[in-house]
Image: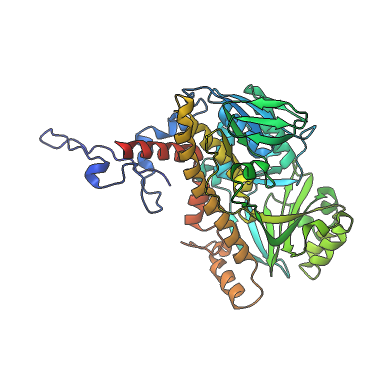
């Protein structure tokens, strides 16, 4: 939430100035309110906060320029490289794949990460491939009737960035291109097999050792850095018992069928929700592909899942649902089945010597029900760059990284919780709970004013918490608050 910035009161008639500050008003020294409010945000403009170095396309440069090695050129690793390079650090990214080739098809880019990507110049790399849907339609599983609605049309004005969707590969290419522009070295076919947190080094499968001042591990859900960091914890992300089929359908096939062509008429996200299942869908690749994520319960061992039966399995899993939806599902020719995992809350993301830090899915894997997994990794990179900015010597990394993990463990942990809550809300069986939920979302469907909603994507408080959060500003506020507390 934004800081409460207190301005001096106007001069009195006698010409005296009555200066009000945080201490006088009994506010926290960091000028943060302990309750969620946007009522004080207008005061930030009076202090020029919107043009501060944390929201500028030309940020303040780091006092100490570090040599930083990032393991992983996924979305989080590349975003972090950009955030760090913008502030003057020398960055090398090591990626095990011989070429960049993101899988998983579509990705949602909410305003909290989109605002950062826009600020960093990433959206300039092929902006036409970042679609801006007008709304999210929540549909009943059985017949597709509209039961919930989120208007996305004003998000750009309200949150400083639109709600976007894209192909994951297109986003990765844009991040890669921007990283190269900023001087980041991206080394492909470079598999990290071991971390040396005590001397800020990694070992590659070739035997080469790559050293830096700081190692950033963005090595995903199956992170080996996490176990290197905290071997006693054995805090592997846990399988939730849910899985998701991910697939794309040629949009031309849908457009040629009058019964289902309606879903392409305007850019929107459509999600069918039912007992322990849901289907998220939207167009990507400039309208050429129709992306689908089909979530369902599956407690079986993921190692037993067979790719060759996935298409038949997904059709069987959603048999009996809205006939228009099942007709679209029948057009799937190939799909990938993913286990959905949720990361356990770690005590620390930083090595004892403060030369290794983990972020992204390595630190906080989450189910995709808030569509915030990649966004949290982007926020991690933004916060890390700000936290390192004031370090004047290598000995300052301990404090900088401590502040970083405090901010990010709190934020990402709350988003993990919000994602699980969505899974609860969406997956009710038909009955009293489902009917109460649908009634609680009715106002948004009918266009009536509402102060709260069972739909977290429409609920005003949840929206501001999720999308109004600025990772660079929040990290700077935490640093300032910590500095004031020491005075």
Number of numbered callouts drawn:
0
Looking at the picture, the colour scheme in use is rainbow
Is residue 49 toward the left or the right of residue 112 in the image? left
Q: Is residue 124 visible?
A: no
Instruction: Residue at the far left: name it.
Output: 14
Residue 87 x/y as whole percent: 53, 25
Q: Closest to the observer: 56 or 163?
A: 56
Residue 78 x/y as whole percent: 65, 33
Q: Closest to the observer: 359 or 138?
A: 359
Which residue does the image show at 80% across and 32% down from the upper left? 98
Instruction: Residue at the far bottom: name it.
Output: 432
Quadrant of image for the C terminus: top left
Q: Closest to the observer: 383 or 321?
A: 383
Q: Quadrant of residue 350?
A: top right
Residue 434 x/y as whole percent: 61, 73
Instruction: Residue at the far right: name it.
Output: 308
464 to 199, vertically: above or below: below
Residue 482 x/y as whole percent: 37, 39
Is residue 415 toward the left or the right of residue 35 in the image? right
Q: Is residue 463 visible?
A: yes
Q: Quadrant of residue 424?
A: bottom right
Is residue 157 toward the left or the right of residue 201 in the image? left
Which residue does the image show at 38% across and 54% down from the upper left? 35
């Amino acid at each position: 939430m934004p800081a409460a910035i207190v301005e001096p009161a106007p001069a009195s008639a006698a010409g005296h100035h009555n200066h009000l500050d945080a201490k006088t008003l009994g506010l926290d020294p960091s000028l943060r309110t302990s309750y969620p409010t946007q009522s004080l945000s207008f005061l930030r403009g009076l202090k020029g906060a919107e043009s501060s170095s944390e929201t500028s396309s030309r940020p303040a440069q780091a006092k100490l320029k570090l040599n930083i090695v990032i393991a992983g050129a996924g979305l989080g690793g590349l975003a972090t490289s950009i955030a760090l390079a913008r502030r003057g650090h020398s960055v090398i990214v090591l990626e095990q794949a011989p070429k960049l080739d993101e899988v998983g098809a579509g990705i949602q880019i909410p305003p909290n990460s989109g605002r950062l990507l826009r600020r960093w110049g990433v959206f300039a790399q092929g902006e036409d491939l970042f679609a801006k849907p007008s709304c999210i339609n929540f549909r009943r599983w059985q017949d597709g009737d509209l039961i919930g609605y989120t208007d996305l049309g004003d998000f750009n004005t309200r949150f400083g960035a639109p709600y976007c969707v894209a192909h994951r590969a297109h986003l990765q290419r844009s991040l890669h291109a921007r990283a190269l522009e900023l001087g980041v070295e991206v080394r492909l076919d470079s598999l990290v097999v071991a971390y040396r947190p005590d001397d800020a080094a990694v070992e590659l499968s070739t035997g080469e050792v790559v050293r830096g001042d700081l190692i950033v591990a963005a090595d995903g859900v199956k992170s080996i850095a996490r176990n290197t960091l905290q071997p006693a914890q054995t805090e592997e992300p846990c399988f939730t018992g849910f899985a998701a089929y991910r697939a794309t359908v040629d949009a031309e096939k849908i457009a040629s069928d009058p019964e289902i062509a309606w879903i392409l008429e305007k850019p929107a996200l459509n999600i069918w929700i039912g007992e322990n299942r849901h289907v998220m869908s939207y167009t990507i690749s400039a309208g050429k592909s129709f992306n689908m994520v089909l979530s369902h319960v599956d407690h079986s061992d993921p190692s037993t899942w067979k790719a060759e039966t996935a298409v038949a399995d997904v059709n069987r899993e959603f048999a009996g649902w809205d006939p228009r939806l099942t007709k679209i599902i029948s057009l799937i020719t190939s799909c990938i089945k993913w286990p959905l995992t949720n990361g356990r809350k770690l005590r620390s993301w930083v090595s004892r010597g403060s030369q290794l830090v983990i972020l992204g899915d390595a630190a906080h894997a989450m189910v995709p029900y808030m569509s915030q997994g990649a966004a949290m990794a982007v926020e991690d990179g933004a916060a890390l760059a700000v936290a390192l900015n004031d370090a004047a010597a290598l000995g300052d990394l301990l404090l900088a990284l401590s502040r970083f993990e405090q901010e990010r463990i709190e934020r990402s942990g709350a988003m993990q919780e919000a994602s699980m809550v969505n899974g609860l809300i969406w997956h009710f069986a038909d009955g009293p709970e489902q009917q109460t939920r649908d009634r609680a979302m009715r106002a948004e469907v009918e266009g009536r004013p509402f102060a709260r909603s069972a739909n977290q994507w429409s609920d005003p408080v949840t929206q501001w918490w999720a999308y109004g959060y600025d990772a660079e500003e929040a990290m700077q506020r935490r640093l300032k608050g910590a500095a004031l507390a020491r005075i």
